[in-house]
Image (spheres, rainbow, N blue to C red):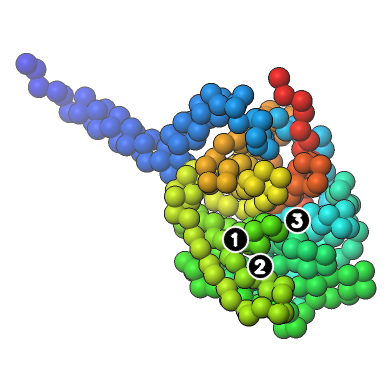
Amino acid sequence: MPRPTPARLIVATLLLAALLLGAVAAQQLRLFERAWFMLQEWRHAAEWRERSIWLPDYVATLQAQPIVGLDDDVSALTYDPDRRSLFTVTNQKPQLIELSLDGRILRQIPLVGFGDPEAIEYISHGIYVITDERLQRLIKVRLDDDTRFIDATESQQLSLGIDRNGNKGFEGLAYDSQGQRLFVAKERDPVSIYEIHGFPHTNPDKPFAVHVAGDAKRDARLFVRDLSSLQYDEASGHLLALSDESRLVLELDANGKPISSLSLLGGRQGLKKGVPQAEGVAMDDAGTLYLVSEPNLFYVFKKQPGD
């Protein structure tokens, strides 16, 4: 049997190295898990569509509309059913921004004493929670028509030291009003979703007791590279998880299992171009999805009748 030549050995070594690098990259991007999920999503479409939000039926009806009038990038998004408007935050020059449902600025409110606000979530009438990412603070704030600024030092706060990693902290919030659970997304390293009971403290007649719980099984199912935002759907009990780097919105059922997805790539879901850097997702009472992306772009997705 002839011995391989040095040139063949070099080629074989390079091919093996390329295969190993490809396998590592596929694992880093969670491509195997994503491909398996896409197969399951297709197989179970008829079954899951009837009892879920079912993201594949959503189509962009407004896309890449600039949010005019801001010098700083927005982060996160929440829907206020009382005001029928949206709220987001900026972090370089901390502000709370109220948006109309077509992406116009309604008002801007300075945030005083906030280091790095990254997410905001509607809790109840006039009550919101804002995250301070680097310090891992959750800050309960009040807002009404006369509010001119919000001071963190005058607000109820909860500090958590969970897997602290610089600015890879709390990026998303969602609230389950029936279960009184606040979902908190850790961006990455590792990607995690925590459930917090007892904050914000809304009943002064009860003691202030906070319980923080994780779900390792749910986190392991998240085949996304990062988390940017969360949205809880009261009707189905399902959670939406937005990933900027994976260009994806995932729907998780009540057990934390991914069951449907909305792609943010160009040519998918009615998008002419891909969403450049998705930062926040919110859903209104009618099931319409709203999304903001850096650099201050606004999107609307509406559900179309299924096949």
**What is the distance, in whole Å, between disc 1 and disc 2 at their CAs?**
9 Å
Q: Quadrant of residue 106?
A: bottom right
Which residue in the structure is indicated by mark 2? 131
Dot 3 falls on a residue whose secondary structure is: strand
Closest to the camera, between mark 1 and mark 2, is 1
Which residue in the structure is indicated by mark 3? 78
- Check whether the beta carbons of the residues at disc 1 and disc 2 lie within 8 A of each other: yes
Q: Position of residue 212 (x, y in %)?
A: 53, 67
The residue positioned 64% from the left and 58% from the top of the image is: 179
For marks 1 and 3, the one nearer the N-term is 3
Q: Position of residue 107 (x, y in %)?
A: 89, 63
Tag on residue 100? none
255 is higher (above) or lower (below) than 124: above
Q: Amino acid at mark 2?
A: Thr
The residue positioned 61% from the left and 41% from the top of the image is: 251
Asked whether residue 81 is in view, the answer is yes
**What is the distance, in whole Å, between disc 3 and disc 2 at their CAs?**
13 Å
Q: Amino acid at mark 3?
A: Thr
Q: How many other residues sit within 10 Å of disc 1, few (<14), some (14-19) or many (≥20)?
A: many
**What is the distance, in whole Å, between disc 1 and disc 3 at their CAs?**
14 Å
Dot 2 falls on a residue whose secondary structure is: strand
For marks 1 and 2, the one nearer the N-term is 2
- Tell me the quadrant of the picture where the C terminus can be found: top right
Which residue in the structure is indicated by mark 1? 184
212 is higher (above) or lower (below) than 217: below
